[in-house]
Amino acid sequence: MRRGRFVRIFRLALPIAATEVPAVATIAIDTVLLGQLSASAVAASALGAAVFLFVASICVSIVSSVGHEAAFRCGRRQTRAPNSGFASAAALACVLGVVAAVVCISGGKLLPLLGQDTATAAGALWFLYGIAPGMLPLLIAIGLRGLIAARLPASRLFPVAAGCVALTTMLAVATWVLFIPAQSPANSFRVLLACGVTSSLTFACMALLAWRAYRRAAPVEALKFEPASVVDGASRLLRRGVTIGATTALQTGFFTVIAILCGRCGTTALAAHQVANQCTLLPLMLAFGMSQAAATLTAEAAGENKAHEARRASWDAVTSVAVVMIAMAAGVLLLGRPVLQLMVAAGAPSRNEVLVVAWQLLLVGAGCMLADGVQNVAMGALRGLGSGHLTMYGAVGGYWLVGVPLAWWLGEKLNLGALGVWLGVGAGIHVSAIFLLFFFIYTRAVHEPDAGGVTPVERMGPARQTVKPSQFRATSQ
């Protein structure tokens, strides 16, 4: 039985992780292209990506609530409800996409006020001009991904990822041919704009391919909806996604602040941060996929009123990601140095300084992979168990009370630069993982029935039931 759960986790996690690859691959390819120009160009892309990812992650988390709701309703055998949620998710994605694009560009214009180099901030703004329009199709693609993962075979997501990666590669080659040979400051801005446009086109491709996969597999009646219910559905998804979005804001805001702190340490430090970050992001996409798998499987089991199965699935996901992240950390340590050398061109200015700092950061990142993977999956399990609000406490305690102050103190006050900033990041991630594991074990305990089938929460009586059995569902985010 446990082996079957492990298989289900990976069958669901791998396709979801694959759909994250195009977004990560575009930024990684951008880093390689800009690494042929200068450390300043890489630093500009780091700032632009930090602003975009902060805004996009919040919106993505809100829209992803459609997948949690679909999984819960599938467990309830409510076959029409998960599919009719697409219209509401699309409406919500359109509103959030437009607002988020404006916020991204406005945030880019404020970067010089945060102590960033003027030329680097200008380059980041050009990158944001290109990538901001892609916010809307990205959010639509995320809504479709949640419906496909909950309702249909998740393997249908693999062609979506493959098509996006192929498009990204072709656009990257075109950018290389058109812009890289003519190296000049003005050309750097053009390459940054082209990199942003490449990402937007990739997100549009992702939305089209995801819609094609969903439309071909969904029954005809699944695509019918009442216009009057779209607004109500969108507002319901927004309410359910607020907690997830708030937690994501705390997390991605933390990493955005880290990028800004690295930028305050100098252009070389920010470029090294960006290069090392790309080497650690791709392995963590698998952890993200397993987190979504844990949330989906526990939500589905909760919808079927199989509390024991939900708890077992979530615990198996945590133990699985621990093994996977240890293997990933070993791979990063083994291949990290050659990959870093490929990402920064041999003739690029400040190459040696960037590579030395990036390798130090990569060592810190490899040491954090286990904690980062465990905290991601514990977060997904808590959401599937209906205790998503607890994830906010882990983010506040680990990231903002420990990580940010320590990163600032080590990086700026002790003059350790980007290495000190990343050491603060590592401390924050480990503290957050400890918090989330504690909450995860506690949540499992309060729902664990005794021999008579009564949970500790039920034994406390109505007056002391801080966690009601009715809250054991994925939709109470």
Image (tube, rainbow, N blue to C red):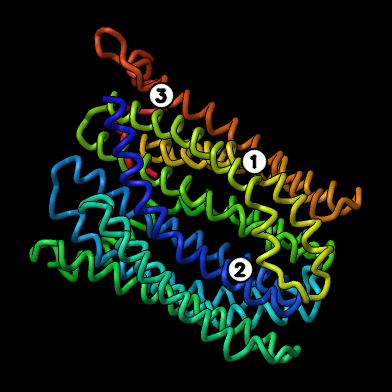
Q: Quadrant of the C terminus?
A: top left
The amino acid sitting under disc 1 is Cys
The amino acid sitting under disc 3 is Arg
Report how far apart the C-alphas of labels 3 and 1 lie in the structure: 25 Å
Q: Which mark is residue 444?
A: 3
Q: Which of 460 and 372 is in front in this view?
A: 372
Q: Vertical placement of 188 versus 327: above or below? A: below
Crowdedness of circle 3 by 10 Å Cα count: few (<14), some, many (20+)? many
Q: Position of residue 276 (x, y in %)?
A: 68, 57
Residue at (17% x, 54% y) in the render: 81
Residue at (32% x, 60% y) in the render: 158
Q: Sequence order check: which comes first, mark 3 or mark 2?
A: 2
Horizontal side of residue 288 vs 72, given as left or right: right
Report how far apart the C-alphas of labels 1 and 2 lie in the structure: 21 Å
Q: Mark 2 points at which residue?
A: 49
Q: Label 2 near label 3: C-beta < 8 Å? A: no
Q: Name the residue under label 1.
A: 368
When asked about the image quadrant of residue 124, the answer is: bottom right
Residue at (75% x, 53% y) in the render: 359
Q: Which of marks 1 and 2 is in front?
A: 1
